[in-house]
Image (spheres, grey):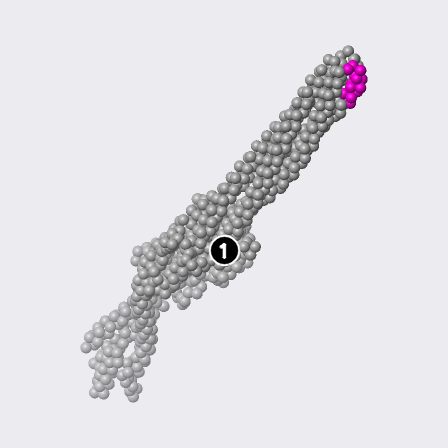
Amino acid sequence: MGLSIGGIGIAATEAITGSVADSALEEQEDAAVREAVAFDDWNERNENFVIASAGAPVVESGEDELIEDYLQDVYYDLPDERMHALYVDTDTGEILAGADSDAETLEELEFPNTDALSSDLSEHEVQRTDPYAMPDALGLAVEEHPVVSYYVGVGSESEGEEGSRALVYTFALSERLIDYTTGGDTVVTILDDEGRIVADDRQLGYGDYETNTSFLRVYEDTDRFQELARSDGPGAIRVDGQPSAALQDHPYEFAPDGYVVGYHTTADDWAVLVHTGEADAFGFVHTVNQFGYLLTVVGVALIGVLGVVLGRNTATSIRRLSDRAGAIRDGDYDVELETTRTDEIGDLYRTIDDMRDSLVTQLEESERAREQAQAAKEQANEAREQAEAATERAERARREAQEQTEHLELTATEYCEVMAACADGDLTRRLEPDTESEAMAEIARTFNETVADLERTVATIATFAEAVAETSDDVRGECVDLEAAGDDVEASVREITATVQRQNDRMGSMSTEIQDTSATVEEIASTANSVAETSQQAAERAGEGIDAAEEVVDEMAAIEARSEAALEEIRRLEEAVDRIDEIVGAVTDIADQTSILALNASIEAAHAGSGDGGPAGDGFATVAEEVKGLAAETKTAAGEIEDLIGTVQERTDATAAEMAAMRERVAEGTETIDRSVAAFREIESDVRRADEGVQDIDEATDAIADSAAELVSMADDVTELSETTATEADEILERATAQTAVISTVAESATDLHERADRLETLLATFETAADGGPTAGSNHLEGVTDEPVDSGEE
């Protein structure tokens, strides 16, 4: 019986011990997983800080002073483990701006990836350095800090080249794990690829300004744990013997004879090891094991005592104690163990009672731990169920949103098709209001109203464009008539100039003849023998002078007639210019009215743009801007035409005045020539009387000499007048030519106005409106536009 009880006790103890040991290993594994996840979260958070700063507009601007201010502002929003935030030149490593650093180059900070900044820098991915020791700026507390830096490119010198600027954020690894909830005989370490300690739960020995730090200390036997973490992680194992020498020195001083290691890896494949001494990890296991064995031994001892002690009472007490010990073994810890015996049996009762109380306490603590674990499990299950319910709700919402999205996409596609057609010019298309979405229905109604207003606007603009085209045709026709009249005036002036030139030439000849006659008279006065011959010659030359003078009179009459005709043409030109001025005024009014139409079209285009946000508003705005531009250009051209007309009128008035002056001078020349003809007739009479008698030679010679002198003077006056007339005729010709050029410019401006009106009609022709081709009565919604001309003075 004793052996049976001993076997049962040993088996039960071993089972309980194994279960509690498995729970301890699972807790160690969970601790390693938590630390690995925490480090990955820390690393991701730091990368997000860098990404957010790199995307800031002020950083992308490349302005060093602005970036300096920005980094100073955001730096103190970073976690406490921040060390500095820098903006650097990747080619030279020069620090251009930054916060919390007085260094001028990355080399002073012993930044390990300086070469990578200039050769392998990315503007799209944050990169991280290996852990390194950065010198302390002051060196008062420690000489260096264990850090890791994150960097990303933020600028480029030219298209296609990598960035020449970078952001570098640095964080202290010694401050990373100070909030770990480990304690007692537990040490957490994180090992890099080379098996060096890069992070822990003891601030790597920097917390108390110690010099014996563990940063980059080699962890012996690292291959074993790293291989386990990478191939079998997460997990936990029990290790006999002492741990790595790296843990036995400061700051860990972890040197138990046996320990448990929980292991896992980070996202960068670094090993996370959580060490706990065997005494702490399996302390409760040992207690349970010892208590179980003790209880078993007690039971066996009781049975032995029962076999040795004699007497009925002793046997009864022992049997009763054995029953109660069995009840305790079976889990009945409330069994009564009081006795009044003071012998060894009484002591055994009291010992078993103390053992029971201790076991109950341990079991209660174990039960509380189990209940806490169960509660945590239930909370996790509840959270999982809530997450699943939320997932189901989200899935239903997603399906409903998907269905709504598909419907909206279909409606939007139909709307886009109609809007595109309207943007291409088909203003007869309309949107069908969506019955399932009030917002889409409102968009459809607003768009339809806008297109209807735009359709009426386009029809009204087309009407005005046709009026502008017709008016420009009238202006161009008038300019053609003016140009023809100007050509006639120019031809007449040219003919007058030629006639005056011929008159000047003949007056020169006549002056020569008169001078010859005067010489002849002097010869008559000097010798009487040649009087008869000289008189005959004088008579002949006087006859020629009379003929020449009569021809000059005829030419002067012709000049006067042509001057009168030219003056009449100039008057008609003035009337035509006045007509052009009236037409230009009408064109200016039309341009002002077109500007009003362009303004209202811009308003309607703005309504269309705010209504749907699509391309229709842009199309309407483009047409409105084109109409507005054409109206402005038309008004400018009309102003230029009006200026040119003013110039033509001034020159026409000047030409008319010059023609009137020329007529007066021609009349004076005619009178002078008439006097010359009379003188020539007197000379002829005198010469003939000289032939009748020599006795009258002296008197006739004196009279002839006087007449010849007067004739020479008159001839000189006529010659001077002819030259003046020729000069003025040349000036009139130049003015007539300039006037013709001005009229040609007016014609070109009218042609340009016509072409612009045609272009406006072409633009408007791209819009398809209702079949009636224009706005119906009362449909004109353009503010300030009526069927009557608009007074530009109201603008």
Which quadrant: the C terminus? bottom right
Q: Is residue 618 left or right of residue 406?
A: right
**Residue at the image position 22 percent from the left and 79 percent from the top:** 303
Instruction: Report x, y in % for residue 327.
Output: 24, 80
Above or below, 676 relative to 579: above
Q: Quadrant of residue 662?
A: top right
Magenta stretch mostly in which secondary structure? helix
Which quadrant: the N terminus? bottom left
Using the rendered image of the protein, determine whether residue 154 is visible from the camera's viewpoint.
no
Q: Is residue 263 left or right of residue 314?
A: right
> Which structural element holds mark 1?
loop
Q: Is residue 380 magenta?
A: no
Q: Which residue is mark 1?
A: 788
**Residue at the image position 23 percent from the left and 71 percent from the top:** 11
Above or below, 46 relative to 491: below
Q: Quadrant of residue 534?
A: top right
Total labels: the figure holds 1
Region rendered in magenta: 693-706
Q: Is residue 339 left or right of residue 35?
A: left
Above or below, 677 relative to 261: above
